[in-house]
């Protein structure tokens, strides 16, 4: 979300800490559906829509051009995992995001339903746990 100039309402989040963590990573993995979700959220912003669209497009351009960034699409293996995860009572978007995190093995989220899941094969953490784990 910070790439798209969207406000982050997460306890302990700071753009400075975010920047420090991003710089320290070898790769940044994003689910394509997370980008779509960010676009949907950007449409709800009460600013001039052309300005919001421009900021979103600039952020997407930066992500697309950065060799550190891997954007995961949805494929056959994802669909098989999705069919299992949807049975956990997740909504559609959460099931897709969890599915696509299986490739990498971890998921950064503030979604309480996802954070409570166990035995998914994915390490699911929130911002506070990431900061603690990285010593930020």
Image: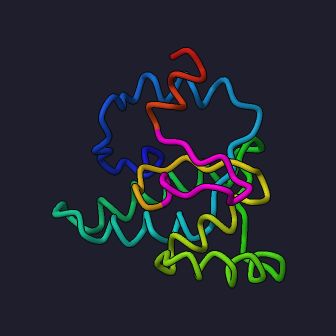
Magenta stretch containing residue 56, yes or no? no
Name the outermost residue toward the front.
Answer: 119
Is most of the magenta stretch helix, strand or loop?
loop
Residue 14 sits in quarter: top left
Residue 110 shown left or right of residue 31 in the figure: left
Q: Position of residue 73 (x, y in %)?
A: 72, 71
> Residue lying farthest left?
46
The picture quadrant where one finds residue 117 is bottom right
70 horizontally vs 12: left or right = right
Residue 78's spot in the image, x, y percent?
76, 75
Which of the two residues, 106 or 27, is positioned nearer the viewer here? 106
Residue lying at 53% horizontally and 64% vertically, measured from the top left: 35
Boundaries of the magenta span: 114-126
Q: Left or right: where does residue 51 sit relative to residue 54?
A: left
Q: Nearer the viewer, residue 112 or 34?
A: 112
Q: How many marks?
A: 0
Residue 121, x across and y down, in percent: 74, 56
Give residue 112's position: percent from left, percent from top.
40, 55
80 vs 9: above or below: below
Q: Compared to 99, does 122 lie above or below?
A: above
Of 24 and 112, which appears nearest the observer? 112
Q: Residue at x 79, y 79 (%)?
A: 75
Q: In the image, is residue 118 part of the stretch drawn in magenta?
A: yes
Residue positioned 29% across, 59% down in the render: 51
Q: For the point 78% across and 82% down, which residue is it?
A: 80
């Amino acid at each position: 979300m910070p790439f798209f100039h969207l406000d982050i309402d997460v306890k302990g989040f700071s753009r400075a800490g975010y920047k420090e963590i991003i710089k320290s990573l070898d790769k940044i993995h994003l689910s394509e559906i997370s980008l779509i979700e960010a676009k949907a959220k950007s449409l709800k912003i009460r600013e001039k829509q052309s300005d919001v669209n421009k900021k979103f497009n600039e952020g997407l351009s930066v992500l697309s051009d950065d060799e550190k960034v891997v954007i995961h699409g949805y494929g056959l293996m994802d669909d098989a995992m999705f069919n299992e995860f949807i049975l956990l009572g997740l909504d559609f978007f959460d099931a897709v995001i969890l599915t696509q995190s299986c490739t990498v093995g971890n998921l950064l989220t503030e979604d309480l339903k996802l954070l409570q899941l166990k035995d998914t094969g994915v390490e699911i953490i929130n911002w506070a746990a990431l900061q603690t784990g990285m010593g930020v």
